[in-house]
Amino acid sequence: MNRRPLLGFTVCWIAGSAAGCLFSGRSLLLYLAGCLLLPAIWAASGSIRWRAAAVFGLALAAAAVYWEWNEAGNVSRLPELLGQPASELNEAYVTAAGVIVSPVERDGDRVDFTVKLSRADLHRQGEEEGQEAASAAAAVTGAGTTAGAQAGAETHAQAAAELVAVQIKLQEENEILAAAEWQRGDRVVIEGELEQPQGARNFGSFDYRAYLLTQQIHWLLKGSGAASVKAEPPAALQPAVILRWNDRARAVLGAEMDRLFREPHAGYMKGLVIGIQELDPETFRQFSQLGLTHILAISGMHVAVYVGVILFLLRRCRVTRETALTITLLLVPVYVLLSGAGPSVVRAGLMSMIALLAARLRLLKDGMNILAAAALFMLVWNPYLLLSVSFQLSFLVTAGLMVYTPLAAPLFKRLPGWLGSTFSVTLIAQLVSFPLTIYYFNQFSLLSFAANLLLVPFITFLVLPLGTLALLLGRFWAAGAKVTVQLAELLNNATFAAVKWVNGYSGGVTIWAAPSLLWICLYYGLLYGLLLALQRRAEEELAPRYMEDETRPLLELEQPGNDRRKTGIPAGLGSLVHSASSPAIPAVVKRSGAPLAYMAFPGRGANRWSNRAALLCLAGIAFLLYNGYNAEDLKGAGVISYLDIGQGDSILITTPAGAHLLVDGGGTLSFGNKEEWRIRRSPYEVGAKTLLPLLKRRGIHRLDAVILTHGDQDHAGGLQAVLEGMPVSALLFNGTLADSEPYAKLMQTALAAGIRLYPVQQGMVLAPDKATRLHFLWPEQAADGQALPAEVEDQNHQSVVFRLEMNSRNFLFTGDMDIAAEEAIMDSAHRSGIRAGQPIDVLKAAHHGSKTATGADWLSFWHPAAAVISAGVNNLYGHPHGDVLERLKDSGTVVYRTDGQGEIQLKVREDGITVRYKLGTE
């Protein structure tokens, strides 16, 4: 803290910002009070000066206040300005005017950009509609207004300035050309529908609304067709025009990459060289699974290579050192802008500029101070960067490399210098990024270290330069560019093949629940202790040991910056070794003021202490990993989660013994075949974007069984991503086949993965553990002699129906069964002498609450205490039907609905059932 005050100030600023983010009110005050005690304790113990303690305390408080101030201003003003509550503005049709302040990006038939509003008016019909549109257009173009009107419009713009995310769905292919003309800086008038961003509807799922809040965006504005946008270029030269030119330059470079390379090489090279993310989803998934996604985005590695190449070329041109540093300093921002200016590249760019400036002025060159300066600048500029995954990974891994790599270096002393350095840097990068990787992505590949060790240097020093060279030669030397491209594609094919081959070992990918903040802090502390102890042990093994000779004169052992210490060392004996206290600060042995040698000697028992400390830290890390990997102990309870996956069904059952059963997987409905130009690179699919990430976030390593009630897309579609992304032991289905391509692909995937297939039928029982039984009630038994599943068009009638008995509680799951199936089940029970079924605690209403099921007789037969209806918000089918809701009300059944309450979760104990849901009733 004394030697690096800027680092201490930045750490305190980050702690204060985190306090403002995590706490509020009295909790925030208590947290700050506790944090302020630490600098005071350090000052009282003499570790830091009181003045430094006061500055650090001020940083904590100022950062928390600064965060709260930003939070207070991060609210939408549209409801107040338009005179309508936010609930009524949702889905309101408006005419909005403003300026495009982001790149304009098209993916298939959708165009996205951000607009800073200067005016927004509720849409009106007839003559008033035209007047409002003209008024909004005047606010943008300034046409036909007097000076006074312009002043009034400007005042209104200052009051109404607000960022909105615009989404335009193109209706015709020829509209692509019109959308291509929209650019950052254009003044636009947009007619469309306001919509509040979707918040998290399941426990632990991605919160899109919260994410947009960190971008200070509170509304989506959705338009239909290119005609809904009227754009005009800026009238005068403005600072934003630089960004407009930059967007155009990036588009030109991307188009040149498309011209030079074939797919998937074009998308891969665009991400690698200029930071345009257009890699096909499957290749991206394979890189992500191995922890190689940092290669696909511009990062500090790219900036370092860029700066190194420029300095090398300038020095080869015999440019003076000062001039070379100055030119490189001026060129770094150009590269940062051209590469997209993401948090990681901005961090690297700032650090490079500070380091270059320090070298130019011969000032401070300490890496940690430079890193602290870059972080502080970015957080003051935008405090919400603290919540950015890219920001966190970039700064944490960089800081980790600076802190941990010197500790790990002695472990690889026996290797050649370059190889030992590569091993230590790769290992530390993996260890430091591990907690954030499992927190945000909930998986970690055990082969990630080997993949990064081999592929990162290969791509950095071969593929990246070749891609850059091809881009530079493309317009000047076609033959040279062609040869370069062919060589780059050959190397890319080798990379893709290697990644695919390694990913073939499915056991190498581990799935982790999101750890707590305390877990992450303990991990980093124990890792530091382990590496420190191993470093001391390695240095003690390398250092020579001498018996103390009390008859020889004492020498003075001095370390720079420390007090002198006496040690018994035979006079005149010396060796060049590392300091035991710090590998970066050599110990200087002096006699009569003249340096004799550089030496380090372990104290008695030091080796034993290092071994014990290393074992203790290693045991602590092992304990953390064990607890982090294993799911939460439910202490004998079972959990049933009715997931909100839109218009469909998906239910996760966790038994008291920890078995995981997934009933259906939802699915994204599509109507007809899309034209090729409409197809998006990574369209929303509920299995890949919602269900699979949710299962991983809850730390589910394997599904013991997947129960597919029937083959309709809204039940089976999402299971494709689950079977591809997670180990599954068994797939239970209704014994029939559905006539659809997705269903056939799902079954082929199951067979290829070695998943056991079981057709279920009436009378079968599944017992995952002693406290859990699944009694299958439907479909009826197959006809005698039927060996293979038959193709059935009406899948609803053949839905799997079962009664779950768990901890002496009963639940009924019904898929999309119809009233005919309900009557058949009741008739079968009557023939067996059963006049009424086992009273049910919770019934899953069939077919999303459709009127074709959940009849009055069915409710009388089971007497459910509660019912859950899984349906999408504002779905096109009108589910749940009013008649079903009336029948449930008449039977005295409590109703829970995913369209109004999000995920509905039941914790099942023998003494009762606890219900919680994600959202309040709408």
Image: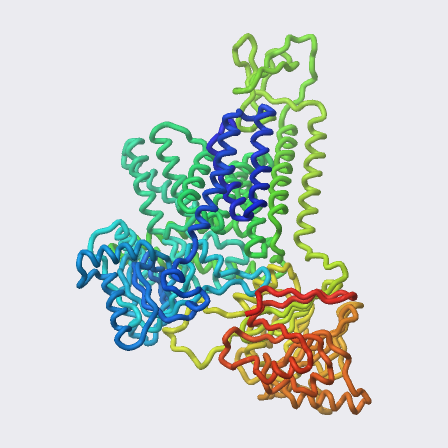
262 sits left or right of 564 in the view: left
679 sits left or right of 520 in the view: left
Residue at left offset 59%, top offset 17%: 574
Please identify the quarter of the rendering in which residue 124 is found.
bottom left
- Vertical arrangement, residue 802 with respect to residue 89, above or below: below
Residue at left offset 47%, top offset 78%: 670
| Quadrant location, the C terminus | bottom right
861 sits left or right of 227 in the view: right
Of 500 and 484, nearer the camera is 500
Residue at left offset 55%, top offset 46%: 25
Q: Is residue 398 visible?
A: no
Q: How many marks?
A: 0
- Vertical arrangement, residue 45 with respect to residue 846, above or below: above
Of 866 and 589, nearer the camera is 866
Q: Is residue 434 visible?
A: yes
Please identify the quarter of the rendering in which residue 813 is found.
bottom right
319 sits left or right of 77 in the view: left
Residue 193 image point, x, y percent: 38, 70
Residue 810 image point, x, y percent: 75, 74
Of 444 and 629, nearer the camera is 629
Residue at left offset 27%, top offset 69%: 133
Residue 172 image point, x, y percent: 32, 76
- Vertical arrangement, residue 535 with respect to residue 857, above or below: above
Of 406 and 907, nearer the camera is 907
